[in-house]
Image (spheres, rainbow, N blue to C red):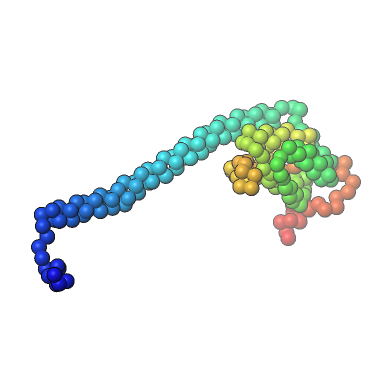
Amino acid sequence: MTKKAILNRAFTPREKGLILALALVLVGAFYYFAVIQGTSATLSANEQRMAELQISLEEQQVKAVQLRAMEAELEQLSNKKEAPQVQVYNNFRGEWDQLKGLLRDATSFQLNFGDPVATGQLVRRPVQASFTTGSYQEALALVERIQKGQYRCVINDFGMSQVSDQVKDQAGVSVSVSMTFYETLEGATDLSGLTFADQKDQG
């Protein structure tokens, strides 16, 4: 039988049935891998994402409750008569040592002191602090300790975000704090390094 004859001959009912069955198998395999498997993977990814979002939401709710409690406590502290001391200028070394001591339990920290500015007899020294801790609770505790320190300090703003250390496979909290230390010129004998507010405005 020639090749042309083979191509032109009619398929038997059995052969047609086998071809139809094979076609159905191929269509079913395509549907399974392209639709069912794809949908299953998408659902699994969505479930994982929802679980992550739920954990994040719970963490934010706990954080919000803790922040409100700490803000209320800090407000009570500011109203107490035994408020932290306002030191005579220049108390840079005392403030530096205090912050280093308070942040000794942090995983890491960095301090940036701005130039002190005097308005009348009052001196404001801005400080930017950043540090990392193991949890939100530890971060809030450190911010509270800064506010309650020996020297008069006001927390202007602070923020927290979760971070991860892929090398150590650990999660932590990164904290940034903007604060101002207050000092007085009453009794000051050395005004070096000080900028007066009117001079700053003119510059």
Write down the quadrant of residue 86 in the picture: top right
Residue drawn at point x = 54 percent, y = 35 percent: 59
- Relative to 136, is 163 above or below? below
Residue 10 horizontal/vertical position (percent)? 9, 63
The image quarter in which residue 19 lies: bottom left
Quadrant, the C terminus = bottom right
Tell me residue 164's x, y (percent).
Answer: 60, 45
Residue beneath the point at 73% across and 59% down? 202
Quick one: 23 or 67, which is closer to the camera?
23
Horizontally, residue 56 falls left or right of residue 138, namely left
Q: Is residue 32 left or right of residue 9?
A: right
Give the answer, above or below, for where 192 lies relative to 173: below
Where the N terminus falls, by quadrant? bottom left
Height in image: 24 above or below 70? below
In the image, what residue occupies the spot 74% across and 47% down? Answer: 111
Residue 152 seen: no
Q: Nearer the viewer, residue 173 or 194?
A: 173
Specify whether 108 is left or right of 22.
Answer: right
* Picture quadrant where residue 158 is located: top right
Q: Is residue 202 left or right of residue 23?
A: right
Q: How many marks?
A: 0
Q: Is residue 2 visible?
A: yes
Residue at the (34%, 47%) spot, across then down: 37
